[in-house]
Image: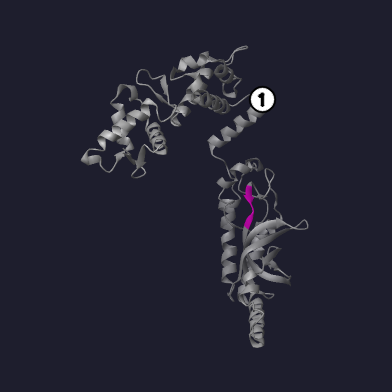
């Protein structure tokens, strides 16, 4: 009785504190965040421990479905502790009214299918076994059906039912706590959670805020983002260079500016260069930057590699019959005859050996690994480990 009176006093103090926020944070700081960034908020990934009165006042999140908004925190799972003030049994669930002193919320606690199956008796069972099974089944159900005045702990997802929020429980149990210590500790911890977590706005990292502003500006002006133009040019060059009928074995970055299709993509109106754009023409800085970044992606994917003759000269890799792949195969065949490398050559060793050749002195580690993968697919080499390779013959 003393514990319940103490908790009643705590709830009175808590109800007095549950008013307008006095931390000095303005409502303009609680801006809704786009759904694709919800996972960055720790509150969204956890079961939020909140007052039931606050849970009942939650509204749907304005930027996406599946969550409810407290300030600008997206919440869809909650963790509550309270007394049972209503108990209803249905065919497949129990409906409990849980009261923590600030409000009452309905919790749907689903019955486990194991209860029906655990004591199932076959058609050929004796009458005594059937009776014992039904008694045990009844006792099991009685242990899952709580009584008024019990203190229970519930976790689950929030959902709307008949224009009212309720909890669809994924976990629930009765707390054997006659002194109500668990409930008291929860009520003492909640003000600290509200002050340090829930009542503080969730703010996206500065680079994401900048990215969102750029995307918004791109939609408003109708201009294309630089990243989108790079993707377009990358896809075009990848298919164009892979076509053997083009006859392109190597190219200089400046030579790509003579291809009409490349210039059409690279000179499209771009949001990032709108201030540098002249009347009826794209800035040369935009064209060179987009072409360079698209070719760098090709290099990372192993489609091309930088030639040793010039920093801006690139060799095209058509298949495992390319000069790069054949040179790597020769290195493996020679070095793996040595006792030191009889277990296979590390791909970084292969890259060092390639750098000794003037034609391959700018080849990157990613390009070497992709070339080794091509050779392995053609059964020219086998991988001794994830990083060591041995020639087949």
Residue 171 lies, in percent from the top left, at 61, 65
Q: Where does label 1 land, which residue?
A: 222
Outermost residue, top side: 279
- Residue at x 44%, y 18% (from the top left corner): 251
Q: Nearer the viewer, residue 346 or 9?
A: 346
Task: Residue 319: say if magenta.
Answer: no
Q: Give the answer, above or below, for where 352 lies relative to 274.
A: below
Identify the magenta region.
73-77
Q: Is residue 241 left or right of residue 34?
A: left
Residue 6 appears anywhere in the view: yes
Inspect this view and state whether residue 150 appears.
no
Q: Residues within 10 Å of mark 1 (few under 14, many from 20)?
A: few
Name above or below for residue 12 compared with residue 264: below
Given the current orientation, which residue lies at the most extreme left position? 339
Q: Position of residue 51 (x, y in %)?
A: 65, 60
Name the spot of residue 113 as percent of width and height, x first.
64, 69
- Residue 230 lies in quadrant: top right
Q: Residue at x 60, y 46 (%)?
A: 38
Is residue 76 one of those drawn in magenta? yes
Residue located 45% across and 28% down the image: 303
- Image position of 233 (left or right of 167): left
> Which of these two is toward me, 308 or 19?
308
Q: Residue furthest bottom?
A: 128
Query: Magenta part mainly helix, strand or loop?
Result: strand
Which part of the image, by quadrant, shows the N terminus?
bottom right
176 over 109 or under it: above or below: below
């Amino acid at each position: 009785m003393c514990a319940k009176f103490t908790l009643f006093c705590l709830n009175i103090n808590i109800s007095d504190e549950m008013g307008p926020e006095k931390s000095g944070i303005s409502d303009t700081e609680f801006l809704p965040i786009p759904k694709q960034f919800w996972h960055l908020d720790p509150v969204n990934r956890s079961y939020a421990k909140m007052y039931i009165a606050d849970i009942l006042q939650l509204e749907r999140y304005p930027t996406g479905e599946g969550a409810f908004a407290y300030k600008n925190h997206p919440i869809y799972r909650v963790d509550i502790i309270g007394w049972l003030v209503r108990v209803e049994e249905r065919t497949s669930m129990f409906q409990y009214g849980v009261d923590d002193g600030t409000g009452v919320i309905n919790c749907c606690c689903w019955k486990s299918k194991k209860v029906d199956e655990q004591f199932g008796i076959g058609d050929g069972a004796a009458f005594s076994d059937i009776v014992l099974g039904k008694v045990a089944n009844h006792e099991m159900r009685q242990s899952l059906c709580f009584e008024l005045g019990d203190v229970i702990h519930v976790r689950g997802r929030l959902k709307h039912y008949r224009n009212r929020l309720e909890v669809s429980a994924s976990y629930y149990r009765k707390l054997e706590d006659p002194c109500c210590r668990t409930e008291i500790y929860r009520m003492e911890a909640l003000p600290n959670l509200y002050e340090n977590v829930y009542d503080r706005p969730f703010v996206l990292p500065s680079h994401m805020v900048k990215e969102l502003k750029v995307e918004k500006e791109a939609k408003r002006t109708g201009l294309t983002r630089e990243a989108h133009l790079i993707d377009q040019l990358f896809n075009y060059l990848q298919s164009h260079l892979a076509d053997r009928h083009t006859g392109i074995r190597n190219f200089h970055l400046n030579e790509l500016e003579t291809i009409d299709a490349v210039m059409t993509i690279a000179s499209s109106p771009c949001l990032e260069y709108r201030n540098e754009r002249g009347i009826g023409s794209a800035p040369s800085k935009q064209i060179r930057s987009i072409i360079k970044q698209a070719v760098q992606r090709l290099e990372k994917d192993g489609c091309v590699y930088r030639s040793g003759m010039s920093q801006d000269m690139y060799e095209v890799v058509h298949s495992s019959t390319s000069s790069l792949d054949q040179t790597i195969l020769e290195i493996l065949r020679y070095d793996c005859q040595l006792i030191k490398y009889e277990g296979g050559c590390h791909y970084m060793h292969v890259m060092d050996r390639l750098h000794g050749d003037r034609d391959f002195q700018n080849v990157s580690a990613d390009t070497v690994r992709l070339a080794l993968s091509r050779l392995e697919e053609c059964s020219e080499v086998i991988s001794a480990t994830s990083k060591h390779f041995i020639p087949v013959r």
